[in-house]
Amino acid sequence: MTDPLLSVQNLQKHFPITKGLLKRQVGAVKAVDGVSFDVVKGETIGLVGESGCGKTTTGRLITRLIEPTGGKIVFEGHDITHASQGRMRPLRRDVQMIFQDPYSSLNPRHTVGAIVGAPFRIQGIKTEQGTKKAVQEILELVGLNPEHYNRYPHEFSGGQRQRIGIARTLALKPKLIIADEPVSALDVSIQAQVVNLLEDLQNELDLTYVVIAHDLSVVRHISDRVAVMYLGKIVELADRKSLYESPMHPYTNALLSAVPIPDPKRRKERERIRLQGDVPSPLNPPPACRFHTRCWKAQEICSQVEPPLLALATGHQVACHFPENAPAPGAVSTTGEGLVTADGGPAAGDGTAAE
Amino acid sequence: MTFLELKDLRIHFPTDDGLVKSVDGLSYSLERGKTLGIVGESGSGKSVTSLGILGLHKGGPAKISGEIWLDGEELVSASAEHVRTLRGKKMAMIFQDPLSAMHPFYTVGAQIIEAYRIHHNVSKKVARKHAIDMLDRVGIPQPDRRVDSYPHEFSGGMRQRAMIAMALSCDPELLIADEPTTALDVTVQAQILDLMRDLQRDFNAALIIITHDLGVVAELSDDILVMYAGKAIEYGTAEDIFERPEHPYTWGLLGSMPRLDRERTERLVPIKGTPPSLINVPQGCAFHPRCAYEDRTGGKSTTEVPALLESEGGHLVRCHLPRDVRRAVWENEIKPNLEAS
């Protein structure tokens, strides 16, 4: 196996809650609490979960827009967890971000040329035929008219603005792109255009994506592997096919069954797993397995022992005491691929047998 | 008598840049106990129509013509005062964003009580009891305590439930839900959709659900209306729209959408271009600049606005393509692409 392009190890981000004049810390929102995954060059990994599960925070930690509390981020073999601004700057060429809202992520007072040209200016890169030519080439690449170089963002539609954002991201030919909800603000017909554009660009430019989204069908379409997050932790990580066809974690099952299916004939026969209530507050998450308060399979152990993220099948990691669709215990070695070792919890092996 | 009927409704807004024809000749009907899904992209006029039914354009700059018949009463020509007495009691609306639709300074209970007491001559105590009952009905835990909470103390899903409780508090016969679940997470969305289905059955209300999500529409609707640039372009039963869609725009919507219930397709099939500006709607068929089959209409699409004509059994389509061409294209060119090879 080749070295991963990006390796995230036990990443944590706790936002302190302060009180009073002296800003005494009274608690912490554990937005991301021990997340580990690898990203191999050329693949697309999807991070899904409901609001507040920490997927966006994870994206911002990887791009170092916010400072991690703990854990490690390794990009191309360099530990960048706490790299200084100065050390990060050259790396920013390689790691770029696409933002969700194409309205607030573009400066309304700058022209498209200035926006897409900014990375060249900031990084001090001189291109052969000048920045303008380079910018126009990128605009063409993302399907915009190069003659619109001097226009302002308000002259474009939502889909076109998202293309401008993507053009800026691509300016310096990055290796890794973090796309945070790249299509959720767009109309259905435009969403498909942008999804196809992202796929084409990946093939042409050999890009690696981390796509953060809440829409499970979009994530299935574009991802090679998918990580499901719940309250700051990854509960399941698998390749696309296994995750969608034989999900192991009850939460993944519930998420998938909640997606409305555009087929009126099937609405009657469909059985849906109804989760009760809302996601608990990350300020005070439930102990041990964080999903046990809403899980229909939960037993005593779930509120006492935290299930470790184990590889129960090749490339299929899940953190659950009572996983579904799991192969018989002993059939799979837990030491295969994956980052997590089995020393996290005592009863993990017994748990897999229960149904 | 039809419960709700729109006849050639037009809602136009004069602006400095020209006349915005948000709704341009829309007709549909809806019976009690039935659900109509209205689908369309931003700017297709789906929300403006609903605000028009509720009479919320009265006194504004909008120019409204046509007829809206609700239970034997015509609403376009009715006075603003009269429509006000119907609003809340006869018809109610669930808005997309409950945080901005609820007043942040008043408790959730106070807002439900206010709506109830406008239409019912009861004491505050009785109204409060009713508010608690409604909150209980929509599944808010500890309703007798939560009735005194402020909207910001509720989570997104609870807020949407409280909105539904408020809309249902006066037992409306027509309920309009404008993107009721768009702001919610998928598990909460499933809860709210179930709730709306149950409540509609219990109250036997007519429900209009407006959304851009074809999945949500398929879950709830009996009939579906697809809107584009202020006009209905396809109107039929849910099965007509999903099994035998005949308009290229509907095909485009279906092709744009990745689906979990089918094998993954290699490529999505988007609609080219972007939705038109309503000030400058394209000549002829408004969809023709984005239509992949425009060349098969014999040039009519750029000159003539197609009429909304019946294809079969109440399935209406606004398209210049001859019916057998549409059917052949759907069966041979579109449908196979939607299912993965």
Image (spheres, rainbow, N blue to C red):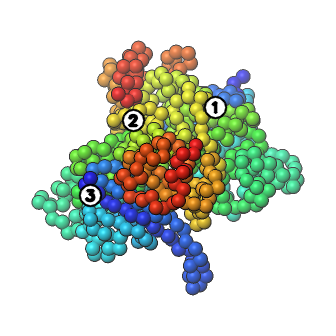
Question: Dot 3 falls on which chain?
Answer: A
Question: Which amino acid, mark 2?
Answer: Arg
User: Can you tell which of label 3 and label 1 is closer to the viewer?
Assistant: 3
Name the residue that disc number 2 marks. B264
Q: Residue furthest front?
A: A330
**Left or right relative to B239: residue A314:** left
- Pick the residue in front: A184 or B278: A184
Q: CA distance from mark 1 to mark 2?
A: 30 Å
Callout 1: few (<14), some (14-19), or many (20+) C-alpha neighbours within 10 Å?
A: many
* Residue drawn at 42 percent across, 65 percent down: A11
Question: Dot 1 falls on which chain?
Answer: B
Question: Dot 2 falls on which chain?
Answer: B
**Left or right relative to A23: residue B174:** right
On screen, A139 above or below B150?
above
User: Can you tell which of label 3 and label 2 is closer to the viewer?
Assistant: 3
Q: Position of residue A163 (x, y in %)?
A: 33, 50
Question: Which amino acid, mark 3?
Answer: Asp
Secondary structure under badge 1?
Answer: strand
* Residue drawn at 49 percent across, 17 percent down: B311
User: Can you tell which of label 1 and label 2 is closer to the viewer?
Assistant: 2
* Residue drawn at 79 percent across, 56 percent down: B144
Q: Earlier in the sequence, mark 1 or mark 2?
A: 1
Name the residue that disc number 3 marks. A3
Name the residue that disc number 1 marks. B35
